[in-house]
Amino acid sequence: MLTLLFLLAVSILWPVVKPQQEKGRVHQHLENHVAAPDGTSEKLTTHLPIITIDTEGGKAIPQERGTAADSTRQQSVRSQIQLFDEANKVHSTDESPRATTLAEVAYRGNSSRHFDKKSLKVRFIDDKGEDSKLTLAGMAEESEWVLHGPFLDRTLVRNYLA
């Protein structure tokens, strides 16, 4: 009986006694971002990382699942990638990128490649086509990354990182 009374008292008093911690949460929809110098507000500004992908010659990323003729890897297209991902900063495509590199970009997944929001597999490479490791959004250094497009999970509750 004493145990039950103790648990009841703790559950009632815990929210009052528990120290409140500031999580530093960003509410982008409540923030006003500075407009471009010419007075327009069409430039993209966000506290989230920005990754631009520019395929060589404007080629489309291949939809086919097969491998390329000269490689055992999935069909991909060579691209130039720019990373705007410094921590605790509002990013814009007008600023200079933190890193610019070459990459092989391909669609990822079997059935999901036909969704409106596709996932991409990105493999950072050097001028010779060899793997090149880079950090992305403050995470550990790697050469292969997935840009996940959770088309079927619109609530984003199934993916912890998202």
Image: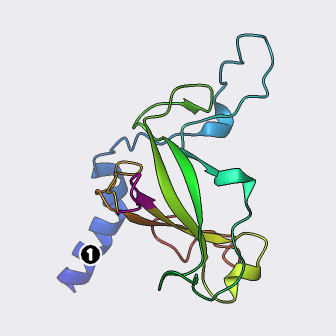
Q: Amino acid at mark 1?
A: Leu
Residue depicted at 68% across the width and 71% down the height: 118
Q: Is residue 128 left or right of residue 97?
A: left
Q: Quadrant of residue 143?
A: bottom left
Q: Which residue is mark 1?
A: 7
Residue depicted at 74% across the width and 53% down the height: 58
* Label total for image: 1
Residue depicted at 66% across the width and 76% down the height: 153
Extreme residue toward the top, this view: 38
* 126 falls in the magenta region: yes
Q: From the viewer's side, name the closer residue of 52 and 1.
A: 52
Q: Position of residue 159 (x, y in %)?
A: 51, 73
Relative to 129, residue 26 above or below: above
Q: Position of residue 112 (x, y in %)?
A: 68, 82
Q: From the viewer's side, name the closer residue of 85 and 159.
A: 85
Relative to 160, residue 142 above or below: above
Magenta residues, start to end: 124-130
Secondary structure mostly seen in magenta is loop
Extreme residue toward the front, this view: 70
* 15 falls in the magenta region: no
Q: Position of residue 18 (x, y in %)?
A: 29, 52
Q: How is the image coloured?
A: rainbow
Q: Position of residue 99 (x, y in %)?
A: 43, 39
Q: From the viewer's side, name the closer residue of 28 and 101.
A: 101
Q: Quadrant of residue 94?
A: top right
Classify mark 1: residues with Cα within 10 Å, few (<14), some (14-19) or many (20+).
few
Q: Is residue 75 left or right of residue 43?
A: left
Relative to 99, residue 6 above or below: below
Q: From the viewer's side, name the closer residue of 6 and 81.
A: 81
